[in-house]
Image (cartoon, rainbow, N blue to C red):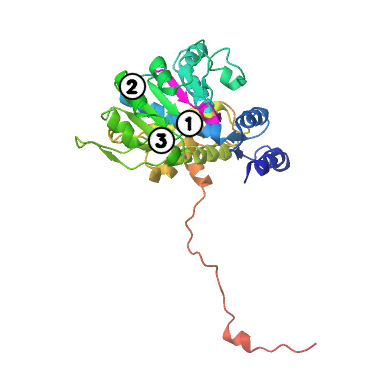
């Protein structure tokens, strides 16, 4: 469905089919995506996958990286290459996660920097949207990403601007020079638009880099024999489980804390062995089980905070959610067919 038709669907579908009709929309221009999300999120059951789904899977990857570095999210300085809906969605969810860790929103905002097509987003710069203004800091204007990285000295570098090769050799080596374990997420896709490759990240950081991408990359083996399996931050980890949980318990509105909860559940499915191999996400083959766990957690929270509308409340919530899952298993893909008995075929009817 193209953006024009999706907009019409968003406007007309929920009023016609009821407020429990879940609408997922994406591929809108930055300003329109936020405008429509803010306009409809408290009226209908809706979410934007570009903003909220991407945020959830990216933050899940960050949570996994924190397990490797043994640090808190609030310990980090995060720099975004890109300031579109994906970047802003991730940044806003990071702020929420930092607040949950105990720091104020103002302190959290200070730890996040953004670079758009015009350079570093700073206070006083012309033509900033309200969403970008939130992350503007008092600083001199800068345009060159290599110089910005060297000046800001981030511990986390996230690319979501679809500029292939934006994370140059100098940027990656600089990240490795002032970070013991630099966290580098090249989340743009397709692969040709990735900010750097997994191989470049691991080789240029001598295996110290913690890498995730939006596109799939092959495993990387270093000269010393160590092999890493880069994790792909795919939104498919998020939206099936969120939709299943929301629909199962009849939630009317989808709040931001659902996506933070989803990120936490995804991270919990990453084993220590996965982390040692460089994986920040569970195997894609386990996505159905991950979706189930996300849905169950959403249902549990919905009943605890009185946002569920399906009653009576199920005692066994996992069994309840399982019963709502679509199954592709059939006894037979062929329809039942019955032939007439031979004797019946001999009976002649009389003309009336």
Q: Residues within 10 Å of mark 3 (few under 14, many from 20)?
A: many
Q: Which residues are magenta?
A: 75-87
Q: Which of the 4 image quarters holds residue 27?
A: top right
Instruction: Establish if 333 lies above or below 234.
Output: below
* Residue at the farthest top position: 138
- Residue 160's disc number: 1
Q: Are marks 3 and 1 in contact (CB under 8 Å)?
A: no
Element under label 2? helix
Instruction: State the SS at label 3.
Output: strand
Relative vertical location of residue 163 with respect to residue 287 in this rendering, above or below = above
Observer-nearest of 147 and 80: 147
Q: Nearer the viewer, residue 318 or 274?
A: 274
Placement of the C terminus among the 4 image quadrants? bottom right
Describe the element under mark 1 as helix, strand or loop: loop
Give the Cα distance between marks 3 and 2.
20 Å
Q: Quadrant of residue 186?
A: top left
- Left of 190 or right of it: where is 310? right
Label 2 belongs to which residue?
A: 174
Q: Earlier in the sequence, mark 3 or mark 2?
A: 2
**Which residue is drawn at the image coordinates 59% and 34% (left, top)?**
47
- Residue in view at x 20 percent, y 37 percent: 225
Residue 76 among magenta residues: yes
- From the top left corner, tell me how far across and down residue 338 is, in percent: 57, 75
Q: Which mark is residue 213?
A: 3
């Amino acid at each position: 469905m193209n953006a024009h038709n999706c907009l019409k669907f968003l406007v007309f579908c929920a009023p016609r089919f009821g407020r429990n009709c879940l609408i997922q929309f994406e591929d809108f221009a930055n300003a329109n995506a936020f405008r429509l999300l803010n306009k409809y999120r408290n009226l209908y059951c809706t979410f934007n996958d570009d903003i909220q789904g991407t945020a959830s899977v990216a933050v899940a990857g960050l949570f996994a990286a924190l397990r490797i570095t043994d640090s808190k999210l609030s310990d980090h300085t995060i720099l975004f290459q890109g300031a579109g809906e994906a970047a802003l969605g991730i940044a806003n969810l990071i702020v929420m996660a930092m607040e949950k860790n105990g720091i104020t929103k103002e302190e959290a905002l200070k730890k996040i920097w953004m670079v758009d097509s015009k350079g570093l987003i700073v206070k006083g710069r012309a033509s900033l949207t309200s969403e970008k203004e939130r992350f503007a800091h008092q600083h001199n204007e800068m345009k060159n990403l290599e110089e910005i990285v060297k000046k800001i000295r981030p511990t986390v570098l996230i690319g979501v601007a679809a500029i292939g090769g934006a994370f140059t050799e100098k940027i990656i080596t600089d990240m490795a020079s002032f970070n013991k374990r630099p966290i580098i997420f090249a989340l743009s896709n397709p692969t040709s638009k990735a900010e750097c490759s997994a191989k470049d990240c691991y080789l240029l950081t001598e295996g110290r880099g913690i890498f995730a991408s939006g596109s799939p990359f092959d495993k990387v083996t270093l000269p010393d024999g160590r092999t890493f399996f880069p994790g792909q931050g795919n939104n498919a980890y998020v939206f099936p489980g969120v939709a299943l949980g929301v629909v199962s318990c009849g939630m009317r509105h989808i709040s931001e804390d659902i996506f933070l909860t989803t990120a936490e559940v995804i991270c919990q499915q990453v084993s220590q062995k996965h982390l040692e191999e460089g994986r920040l996400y569970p195997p894609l083959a386990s996505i159905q089980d991950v979706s189930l766990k996300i849905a169950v957690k959403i249902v549990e929270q919905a009943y605890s905070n009185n946002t569920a509308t399906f009653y009576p409340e199920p005692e066994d919530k996992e069994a309840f959610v399982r019963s709502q899952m679509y199954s592709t298993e059939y006894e037979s893909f062929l329809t039942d067919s019955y032939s007439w008995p031979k004797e019946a075929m001999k009976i002649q009817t009389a003309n009336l």
